[in-house]
Amino acid sequence: MEVVILGGSRQIGRLAADAVEQLVRRKPDAVLGLATGSSPLPVYDELAARHGQGLDFSQASAFALDEYVGLPAGHPASYREVVRREFTNRVNIAPENVHVPDGTAADIPAACAAYEEAMAAAGGIDLQLLGVGTDGHIGFNEPCSSFASRTRIKSLIEQTRRDNARFFDNLGGVPHHVITQGLGTIMAARHVILLATGAQKAQAVRDLVEGPVAAICPASVLQFHPHATILLDEAAASALKLADFYRHTYENKPAWQGL
Ligand SMILES: N[C@@H]1[C@@H](O)[C@H](O)[C@@H](COP(=O)(O)O)O[C@@H]1O
Protein backbone atom coordinates (compact mmCIF):
# COMPACT_ATOMS: atom_id res chain seq x y z
CA MET A 1 0.00 0.00 0.00
CA GLU A 2 1.43 3.36 -1.01
CA VAL A 3 0.07 6.38 0.85
CA VAL A 4 0.49 9.78 -0.83
CA ILE A 5 -0.46 12.97 1.01
CA LEU A 6 -1.09 15.93 -1.30
CA GLY A 7 -2.11 19.57 -0.97
CA GLY A 8 -5.71 19.20 -2.12
CA SER A 9 -8.20 17.63 -4.47
CA ARG A 10 -6.80 19.31 -7.62
CA GLN A 11 -3.42 17.64 -7.03
CA ILE A 12 -5.10 14.35 -6.18
CA GLY A 13 -7.14 14.57 -9.39
CA ARG A 14 -4.02 15.22 -11.45
CA LEU A 15 -2.00 12.37 -9.95
CA ALA A 16 -4.82 9.84 -10.38
CA ALA A 17 -5.37 11.13 -13.94
CA ASP A 18 -1.65 10.61 -14.61
CA ALA A 19 -2.07 6.94 -13.69
CA VAL A 20 -5.12 6.58 -15.94
CA GLU A 21 -3.36 8.38 -18.79
CA GLN A 22 -0.22 6.22 -18.52
CA LEU A 23 -2.39 3.10 -18.53
CA VAL A 24 -4.49 4.14 -21.54
CA ARG A 25 -1.41 5.16 -23.54
CA ARG A 26 0.30 1.84 -22.75
CA LYS A 27 -2.86 -0.24 -23.20
CA PRO A 28 -5.47 1.55 -25.35
CA ASP A 29 -8.11 -1.11 -24.63
CA ALA A 30 -7.68 -0.69 -20.86
CA VAL A 31 -10.54 -1.61 -18.55
CA LEU A 32 -11.28 1.13 -16.03
CA GLY A 33 -13.20 0.68 -12.78
CA LEU A 34 -15.23 3.80 -11.99
CA ALA A 35 -16.28 5.08 -8.60
CA THR A 36 -19.05 7.58 -7.92
CA GLY A 37 -19.49 10.01 -5.03
CA SER A 38 -17.66 13.33 -4.80
CA SER A 39 -14.10 12.03 -4.34
CA PRO A 40 -13.35 10.98 -7.95
CA LEU A 41 -14.88 14.10 -9.56
CA PRO A 42 -11.54 15.99 -9.83
CA VAL A 43 -10.09 12.93 -11.62
CA TYR A 44 -12.93 12.95 -14.14
CA ASP A 45 -12.57 16.72 -14.65
CA GLU A 46 -8.87 16.28 -15.30
CA LEU A 47 -9.41 13.35 -17.69
CA ALA A 48 -12.09 15.29 -19.58
CA ALA A 49 -9.60 18.16 -19.97
CA ARG A 50 -6.88 15.79 -21.17
CA HIS A 51 -9.33 14.20 -23.61
CA GLY A 52 -9.83 17.73 -24.98
CA GLN A 53 -6.07 17.76 -25.60
CA GLY A 54 -6.14 14.43 -27.42
CA LEU A 55 -6.17 11.66 -24.80
CA ASP A 56 -8.05 8.85 -26.54
CA PHE A 57 -10.47 6.48 -24.80
CA SER A 58 -12.00 5.04 -27.98
CA GLN A 59 -10.83 1.49 -27.26
CA ALA A 60 -11.19 1.63 -23.46
CA SER A 61 -14.05 0.21 -21.47
CA ALA A 62 -15.41 0.94 -18.02
CA PHE A 63 -17.26 -0.81 -15.22
CA ALA A 64 -18.97 1.06 -12.39
CA LEU A 65 -18.53 -0.19 -8.86
CA ASP A 66 -22.13 -0.12 -7.76
CA GLU A 67 -25.71 1.02 -8.31
CA TYR A 68 -28.85 1.67 -6.30
CA VAL A 69 -31.64 -0.88 -6.59
CA GLY A 70 -35.02 0.30 -7.81
CA LEU A 71 -34.31 3.82 -9.07
CA PRO A 72 -36.14 4.41 -12.35
CA ALA A 73 -34.01 4.61 -15.51
CA GLY A 74 -32.70 8.14 -15.94
CA HIS A 75 -32.96 9.08 -12.23
CA PRO A 76 -30.26 11.76 -11.78
CA ALA A 77 -28.83 10.07 -8.66
CA SER A 78 -28.58 6.63 -10.28
CA TYR A 79 -24.96 5.74 -10.79
CA ARG A 80 -25.65 4.90 -14.43
CA GLU A 81 -26.51 8.59 -14.88
CA VAL A 82 -23.71 9.85 -12.63
CA VAL A 83 -21.05 7.85 -14.47
CA ARG A 84 -22.36 9.07 -17.81
CA ARG A 85 -22.72 12.71 -16.72
CA GLU A 86 -19.46 13.05 -14.81
CA PHE A 87 -17.14 11.03 -16.99
CA THR A 88 -18.04 8.82 -19.92
CA ASN A 89 -20.05 11.46 -21.83
CA ARG A 90 -17.10 13.84 -21.51
CA VAL A 91 -14.60 11.50 -23.16
CA ASN A 92 -14.85 9.18 -26.16
CA ILE A 93 -15.48 5.84 -24.46
CA ALA A 94 -17.97 3.95 -26.64
CA PRO A 95 -21.34 3.86 -24.80
CA GLU A 96 -21.59 0.10 -25.37
CA ASN A 97 -18.31 -0.29 -23.45
CA VAL A 98 -19.66 1.42 -20.32
CA HIS A 99 -21.14 -1.05 -17.84
CA VAL A 100 -23.15 -0.36 -14.68
CA PRO A 101 -24.90 -3.00 -12.55
CA ASP A 102 -28.59 -3.18 -13.46
CA GLY A 103 -30.50 -1.93 -10.44
CA THR A 104 -33.81 -2.37 -12.24
CA ALA A 105 -33.33 -6.07 -13.07
CA ALA A 106 -36.22 -8.40 -12.25
CA ASP A 107 -33.69 -11.11 -11.36
CA ILE A 108 -31.00 -9.36 -9.31
CA PRO A 109 -28.80 -12.42 -8.62
CA ALA A 110 -28.73 -13.19 -12.36
CA ALA A 111 -27.84 -9.55 -13.13
CA CYS A 112 -24.99 -9.73 -10.58
CA ALA A 113 -23.64 -12.95 -12.09
CA ALA A 114 -23.86 -11.43 -15.58
CA TYR A 115 -21.91 -8.40 -14.36
CA GLU A 116 -19.10 -10.58 -13.03
CA GLU A 117 -19.06 -12.48 -16.33
CA ALA A 118 -18.87 -9.24 -18.33
CA MET A 119 -15.89 -8.08 -16.26
CA ALA A 120 -14.14 -11.41 -16.78
CA ALA A 121 -14.89 -11.37 -20.52
CA ALA A 122 -13.33 -7.88 -20.74
CA GLY A 123 -10.14 -9.29 -19.20
CA GLY A 124 -10.63 -7.91 -15.68
CA ILE A 125 -10.23 -4.40 -14.31
CA ASP A 126 -6.85 -2.77 -14.96
CA LEU A 127 -7.30 0.27 -12.74
CA GLN A 128 -10.06 0.64 -10.16
CA LEU A 129 -10.79 4.10 -8.74
CA LEU A 130 -12.29 4.06 -5.26
CA GLY A 131 -13.67 6.49 -2.72
CA VAL A 132 -14.28 5.47 0.86
CA GLY A 133 -17.37 5.87 3.03
CA THR A 134 -17.16 7.44 6.48
CA ASP A 135 -17.78 3.91 7.82
CA GLY A 136 -14.92 2.47 5.75
CA HIS A 137 -17.03 1.04 2.95
CA ILE A 138 -15.71 0.72 -0.59
CA GLY A 139 -18.20 0.36 -3.40
CA PHE A 140 -21.23 -0.27 -1.22
CA ASN A 141 -19.57 -3.02 0.84
CA GLU A 142 -20.72 -2.00 4.28
CA PRO A 143 -18.95 -3.04 7.51
CA CYS A 144 -18.72 -6.80 7.95
CA SER A 145 -18.99 -7.54 4.23
CA SER A 146 -17.18 -10.73 3.31
CA PHE A 147 -13.64 -10.25 2.04
CA ALA A 148 -14.42 -12.96 -0.52
CA SER A 149 -17.64 -11.35 -1.77
CA ARG A 150 -18.45 -10.84 -5.44
CA THR A 151 -21.09 -8.60 -7.07
CA ARG A 152 -24.33 -8.95 -5.13
CA ILE A 153 -27.23 -7.10 -3.50
CA LYS A 154 -26.53 -5.36 -0.18
CA SER A 155 -28.45 -3.25 2.37
CA LEU A 156 -27.18 0.21 3.27
CA ILE A 157 -26.61 1.25 6.85
CA GLU A 158 -28.30 4.46 7.94
CA GLN A 159 -25.03 6.42 8.14
CA THR A 160 -24.42 5.77 4.43
CA ARG A 161 -27.99 6.66 3.50
CA ARG A 162 -27.61 9.93 5.42
CA ASP A 163 -24.20 10.65 3.84
CA ASN A 164 -25.69 10.13 0.37
CA ALA A 165 -28.99 11.96 0.99
CA ARG A 166 -27.45 15.12 -0.48
CA PHE A 167 -27.82 13.56 -3.93
CA PHE A 168 -31.57 13.01 -3.43
CA ASP A 169 -34.51 15.29 -2.61
CA ASN A 170 -34.62 13.90 0.92
CA LEU A 171 -33.43 10.98 3.06
CA GLY A 172 -36.62 9.05 2.31
CA GLY A 173 -35.67 8.96 -1.37
CA VAL A 174 -32.36 7.12 -0.75
CA PRO A 175 -32.83 3.43 -1.59
CA HIS A 176 -32.14 0.85 1.10
CA HIS A 177 -30.70 -1.67 -1.34
CA VAL A 178 -27.83 -1.56 -3.79
CA ILE A 179 -25.84 -3.80 -6.10
CA THR A 180 -22.11 -3.59 -5.52
CA GLN A 181 -18.98 -5.28 -6.73
CA GLY A 182 -17.79 -7.40 -3.82
CA LEU A 183 -14.56 -6.97 -1.90
CA GLY A 184 -13.24 -10.04 -3.72
CA THR A 185 -14.16 -8.40 -7.03
CA ILE A 186 -12.37 -5.17 -6.11
CA MET A 187 -9.32 -7.11 -4.91
CA ALA A 188 -9.04 -8.72 -8.36
CA ALA A 189 -8.38 -5.34 -10.03
CA ARG A 190 -4.73 -5.07 -11.07
CA HIS A 191 -4.26 -1.60 -9.53
CA VAL A 192 -6.57 0.23 -7.13
CA ILE A 193 -6.39 3.95 -6.37
CA LEU A 194 -8.43 5.10 -3.39
CA LEU A 195 -9.06 8.83 -3.02
CA ALA A 196 -10.12 10.53 0.21
CA THR A 197 -10.38 14.19 1.16
CA GLY A 198 -11.66 16.05 4.19
CA ALA A 199 -11.60 15.57 7.94
CA GLN A 200 -14.80 13.49 7.87
CA LYS A 201 -12.75 10.70 6.25
CA ALA A 202 -9.81 10.83 8.70
CA GLN A 203 -11.00 7.99 10.94
CA ALA A 204 -11.90 5.69 8.04
CA VAL A 205 -8.48 6.43 6.47
CA ARG A 206 -6.70 5.67 9.73
CA ASP A 207 -8.61 2.40 10.05
CA LEU A 208 -8.01 1.32 6.48
CA VAL A 209 -4.31 2.23 6.30
CA GLU A 210 -3.06 1.54 9.81
CA GLY A 211 -5.79 -0.41 11.55
CA PRO A 212 -5.95 -4.16 11.67
CA VAL A 213 -7.36 -5.83 8.57
CA ALA A 214 -10.91 -6.41 9.74
CA ALA A 215 -14.29 -6.60 8.07
CA ILE A 216 -15.60 -3.86 10.37
CA CYS A 217 -13.54 -1.56 8.09
CA PRO A 218 -14.06 -3.13 4.65
CA ALA A 219 -11.45 -0.90 2.97
CA SER A 220 -8.76 -2.40 5.22
CA VAL A 221 -8.77 -5.44 2.91
CA LEU A 222 -6.70 -3.26 0.55
CA GLN A 223 -3.73 -3.90 2.87
CA PHE A 224 -3.64 -7.30 1.16
CA HIS A 225 -3.72 -5.82 -2.35
CA PRO A 226 -0.42 -6.08 -4.23
CA HIS A 227 -0.83 -2.65 -5.85
CA ALA A 228 -2.97 -0.23 -3.83
CA THR A 229 -2.41 3.52 -3.88
CA ILE A 230 -4.09 5.79 -1.33
CA LEU A 231 -4.28 9.49 -2.31
CA LEU A 232 -5.16 11.84 0.55
CA ASP A 233 -5.35 15.51 1.38
CA GLU A 234 -3.95 16.75 4.69
CA ALA A 235 -7.34 16.64 6.44
CA ALA A 236 -8.04 13.04 5.44
CA ALA A 237 -4.48 12.12 6.52
CA SER A 238 -4.73 13.94 9.85
CA ALA A 239 -5.26 10.85 12.03
CA LEU A 240 -2.42 8.79 10.51
CA LYS A 241 0.37 7.85 12.90
CA LEU A 242 2.99 7.50 10.19
CA ALA A 243 2.08 10.55 8.06
CA ASP A 244 5.66 11.89 8.10
CA PHE A 245 6.99 8.54 6.93
CA TYR A 246 4.54 8.45 3.99
CA ARG A 247 5.52 12.00 3.02
CA HIS A 248 9.22 11.18 3.19
CA THR A 249 8.78 7.99 1.17
CA TYR A 250 6.83 9.72 -1.60
CA GLU A 251 9.10 12.77 -1.76
CA ASN A 252 12.18 10.55 -2.10
CA LYS A 253 10.72 8.18 -4.62
CA PRO A 254 12.58 7.81 -7.94
CA ALA A 255 10.82 9.86 -10.63
CA TRP A 256 10.45 6.86 -12.97
CA GLN A 257 8.54 4.81 -10.45
CA GLY A 258 5.03 6.20 -11.07
CA LEU A 259 2.12 5.24 -8.87
N1 LIG B 1 -21.06 4.00 -3.23
C1 LIG B 1 -20.35 5.21 -3.05
C2 LIG B 1 -18.91 4.90 -2.76
O1 LIG B 1 -18.34 4.28 -3.89
C3 LIG B 1 -18.18 6.17 -2.41
O2 LIG B 1 -16.82 5.90 -2.21
C4 LIG B 1 -18.76 6.78 -1.17
C5 LIG B 1 -18.02 8.01 -0.70
O3 LIG B 1 -18.50 9.12 -1.38
P1 LIG B 1 -17.83 10.53 -1.39
O4 LIG B 1 -16.65 10.43 -2.28
O5 LIG B 1 -18.88 11.44 -1.96
O6 LIG B 1 -17.47 10.88 0.01
O7 LIG B 1 -20.09 7.12 -1.49
C6 LIG B 1 -20.94 6.10 -1.98
O8 LIG B 1 -21.41 5.39 -0.90
Image: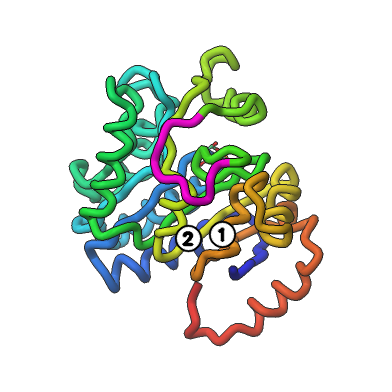
Pick the front one: 141 or 26: 141
As drawn, is 33 to the left or to the right of 250? left
Q: In this view, does 74 lie above or below 148?
A: above
Q: Which residue is drawn at 21% across and 54% down?
A: 121
- Return the x and y of residue 191 as percentages of the image width and height: 44, 64
- Residue visible at 56% across and 87% down in the picture: 254
Across the whole image, how many numbered discs are drawn on residues?
Answer: 2
Image disc number at residue 222: 1
Marks 1 and 2, how far apart in space?
A: 8 Å
Q: 4 or 50, which lies in front?
A: 4
* Figure quadrant of residue 32: bottom left
Query: Where residue 208 sits in the image (x, y, percent)?
Result: 66, 55
For the residue labelled by badge 1, is the local secondary structure a helix, a strand or a loop? helix
Mainly helix, strand or loop, the magenta region?
loop
Q: Is residue 117 above or below residue 24?
A: above
Which residues fall within the magenta stretch? 145-154
| Three-letter code for the amino acid on which mark 1 is drawn | Leu
Q: Residues within 10 Å of mark 2 (few under 14, many from 20)?
A: many
Q: Position of residue 209 (x, y in %)?
A: 68, 60
- Which residue corresponds to mark 2? 192
Q: State if disc 2 and disc 1 touch (CB < 8 Å).
A: yes
Q: In this view, does 29 lie above or below 154?
A: below
Q: Residue 52: within the magenta?
A: no
